Image: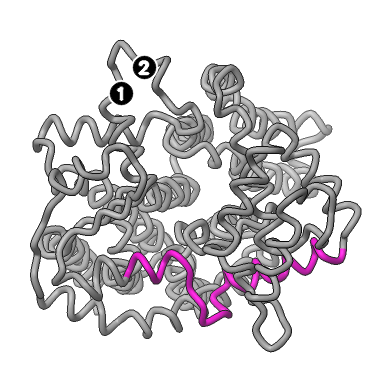
Amino acid sequence: MQDIHRQRVYHGALLAAFVLHVLHGISLPILATYDGAEYLRLADVLGSPNFSAEWDFGRTPLYPALLKLSGWALGRQALAAQAPGLLLGFLGVWCVGASLRRLGHPVWAALGLMALSFYPTLVTYEHTILTESGSFFFLALLLNVLTWQPASGKLKTGALVLVLIAAYYFRPTFLYLAPVVALLQAGPLWLQTWRSRRAGDVGGKAAYLPGAGHLAAVVLLPWVAAYPWNCALAASPRKDFAGEQMLFGLAKQAVIPPGHSVLGAQARAYEEAIHASLADSHLPLAGVDTARLWPIWVALAANHRAEGGRIFREIACANPLRYVKGVVRTTLYFGGVSAHSDENRGFTNAVITTAADGSKVYCFTHPLENVLKERLYQKTGRSLVGRVLNRLIPFYDLMILAGVISTLVVFCIGLRRMDARVLAFAALPLAHSAMFVLILLSADRYAFPAYPIALANLCVLPCWVRWNRAGPRVREAQAPAGAI
């Protein structure tokens, strides 16, 4: 197949991906949870005189701003609330496809575009008022910039800094990816310097300073940009949000020993929740059943939210075996080993499997519940797109497991061959998942943003094999640095 034909296949797949997003955007219903209702409330608060008094500073403003802009452009109705998720999901698919294309094989990139576009869980989160599809977009955008090869390294570093800052103001956890992104940017520069020194072209350790400058910029500048919001958070009632999450992780994976003093009056209920969650005398990979754990965690957070970080460190250090078992269970759960699914499958059932029932508003106890049921009402009915996606759900469950295994293989190849572009495909999803694994947040919704890139790694392996078999002239012809 001639190169121009391969490029046409890629662009045809990109067009098909866009058409599919339009079709399921029209035919599938919206899902709003309690968090979704809160984001819609914040969209109304943004820019109002009551901003400082009513804003939840545990949530950064970019996603509510997109919801507000969408509502202004399309009206206060269901499609407007879905539009940011649909747009960010499509752009994320495009970014991953463009990154695959830079490996030199547009046909495999086209297959990646199709695989991601038909991924039922991604489609689900594009219809859900949550930050998950946007988190996937920013992870994909980081991947796209890392695989980009501009003439100037400073231009690439500047782009990474801007993406990390925007990603932080979309979802704060992206700030913790800055060191990994910085290493992926500075590593190739240091490797090039090391090779030049071995060849005698440059001398002195000062030659490593430019790479160190790029590293420092990517690590520090996003933290500087995040400082004002972090100061506002520290002065708000939500300043202990991270501590609450850590307490949830400890309880979810049963790292807190039964009878521990931190449990207080919840000790008996906690022990009963653990025993009720056991399967064949073993705790499931997902940990303690969330419905049973929820009231226990609410009580723990109310009593110890200000000490959450300290309690996490003390209990993990005092019970290292329990903590390591929790990390292992969460890792396997995120890796797709368990057949049990938490929020991902529940949300997919709501948006795809029961699409004929129309919109779903599950924001019980939220003050806007009744208002949103009317505002977001949809009666979508059955559709061909929904039926096809529903049939694909079990197939993609297996694909995710294969994708995770491929990601580990790609990571080893990238390290062994010192190939920064290949390494980025594995390091980003692994680092993103590790943030939640280490604090034991074993809800599969947190793992989702990395899954589409794990699926893309099923295409990275054949791309890499064919790339390394090709000669230098073929590589140069097949991999335009700025291809999108």
- The image quadrant where one finds the N terminus is bottom left
Q: Is residue 336 magenta?
A: yes
Location of residue 348 in the rendering, given as x and y in whole percent from the top left corner: 32, 69
Dot 2 alpha-carbon crowd within 10 angstroms: few under 14, some 14 to 19, many 20 or more: few
Amino acid type, mark 1: Val
Q: Quick one: 441 or 271, which is closer to the camera?
A: 271
Spatial CA span between label 1 and label 2: 6 Å
Q: Quick one: 449 or 368, which is closer to the camera?
A: 368
- Side of 297 relative to 393 (left or right): right
In the picture as drawn, the residue positioned furthest to the top comes out as 49
The residue lying at 28 percent from left, 67 percent from top is: 350
Q: Is residue 64 above or below residue 119?
A: above
Amino acid type, mark 2: Phe
From the image, tell me which residue sits under label 1: 45
- Side of 250 relative to 18 (left or right): right
From the image, tell me which residue sits under label 2: 51
Q: Quick one: 479 or 199, which is closer to the camera?
A: 479
| Disc sitting over residue 411 in the figure | none
Residue 4 sits in quarter: bottom left
Please give the range of residues in magenta: 321-348
Location of residue 447 in the rendering, given as x and y in whole percent from the top left corner: 52, 60
Q: Secondary structure at mark 2?
A: helix
Q: Quick one: 462 or 454, which is closer to the camera?
A: 454
Q: What colour scheme was applied to this rendering of the protein?
A: one colour
In the picture as drawn, the residue positioned furthest to the bottom comes out as 280
Question: Quick check: marks 1 and 2 in contact, CB under 8 Å?
Answer: yes
Location of residue 58 in the rendering, given as x and y in whole percent from the top left corner: 51, 32
